[in-house]
Amino acid sequence: MSDADGCKSRQQRFVDLMSGQRTGVGACLLRGLAGAGACGYRGIIGLRNAGYRVHLLPARRLGRPVVSVGNITVGGTGKTVLVAEVARWLIDAGCRPAVLMRGYKGNDSPVGSDEAALLRRQFPGVAVEADPDRVAGGRRLLAADAPPDCFILDDGFQHRRLHRDLDVVALDATFDLGGPLARMLPRGLLREPVKSIGRADAVVITRADQAPPEMLERLADLVRRVAPSLPIAQCRHAPTGVDMDGQSQPLATLAGRRYLAFCGIGNPAAFAATVKRLPGECVDFVAFDDHHAYADDELNALAARAARVGADLLLTTTKDRVKITAAPMPLAALQVGIAWIGDGESLREAVLRVAGAVK
């Protein structure tokens, strides 16, 4: 479950293999096979993108403004927090947004998709439709009694079948787009070539506080080479409080506590880095696979492990918390929001302009 056990999540084992940390003949053969697969995948993606570019493949319209928030990599870029920020902007401006998402691994959990459950909890009045066919999902919502007046397309950069009016791409500052994992799947973590960023309308560099200035500058330079005029905003994921027993508490609640932190997200290292800066003391950390559905025996094992290291609290993400109905010991979820570094106002205005909330 964690590095401390000598046992890692599948994502981390994949990263170790493709980054070259795993050595030996077997690892080299696997990387060679993955490289061959990546060539084929790149070709398929190139043909698909060309089909949309020349309109051989049509993009369907819903008759309402659509703001897409997506990325070009697998793994967590902090996209869900950015989707929540966009939803908040639209709600505050008097709009009635709805969120369209794929609902990844929704059948593995009693609450369905973890991202969908989280957004429904954060925004009770916002319709969240989890359906791999985002066009069909949008049409269902438009046929409802109180249809939305705009849509947020979650993880939508590759879902080109649905027309969007604003394409926002999130880039994780902790992921090196010039590094060994900046290759196409399955040889690396790229869903599309870096040049695809050029079709975006705006870029948001997330977790900018967790990367050194020189890495941020390299990332911004790479974006400028692909799209010189593309607006670039930076943000950090700022802890705002903790959810304990369904009640929001200040971060100071963690002071004096010893906790075992755990998560099942795309970028567990980013959560671990955030936890280290919290009040109290993180005495252990456990990483599960992304979208992990927690079984009772796993939660009991976490509680037993917490007891061994002297922890009196389990700490996880809000995305993981929505999938846990009962815990064998006190459980808190870290609440996180977007804090803009520099100019986030331009992006907010672009979102509201597309939605018709400002002229």
Image (cartoon, helix red, strand yellow):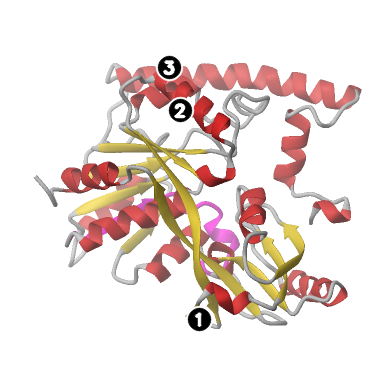
Q: For mark 2, give the secondary structure.
A: helix
Part of the protein shown in magenta: 95-111
Q: Quadrant of the C terminus?
A: top left
Q: Position of residue 327 (x, y in %)?
A: 67, 79
Q: Is residue 100 above or below residue 213?
A: below
- The nearer-to-camera label among 3 and 1 is 3
Q: Earlier in the sequence, mark 2 or mark 3?
A: 2
Q: Quadrant of the N terminus?
A: bottom right
Q: Amino acid at mark 2?
A: Ala
Q: Is residue 242 visible?
A: yes
Q: Is residue 79 magenta?
A: no
Residue positioned most to the left = 359
Q: Amino acid at mark 1?
A: Gly
Q: Position of residue 221 (x, y in %)?
A: 46, 22
**Residue at x 69% of width, y 19% of height:** 35
Q: Position of residue 229 (x, y in %)?
A: 30, 23
Q: Which residue is mark 2?
A: 220
Q: Which mark is residue 225?
A: 3
Q: Earlier in the sequence, mark 3 or mark 1?
A: 3
Q: Is residue 307 above or below residue 5?
A: below
Q: For mark 3, give the secondary structure.
A: helix
Q: For mark 1, give the secondary structure.
A: loop
Q: Position of residue 173 (x, y in %)?
A: 54, 38
96 displayed left or right of 190: left
Q: Which residue is mark 1?
A: 246
**Residue at x 31% of width, y 63% of height:** 127
The Cα–Cα distance between marks 2 and 3, rounded to whole angstroms, is: 9 Å
Q: Which mark is residue 44?
A: none
Q: Is residue 64 visible?
A: no
**Residue at x 36% of width, y 20% of height:** 227
Circle 2/circle 3 CB separation < 8 Å: no
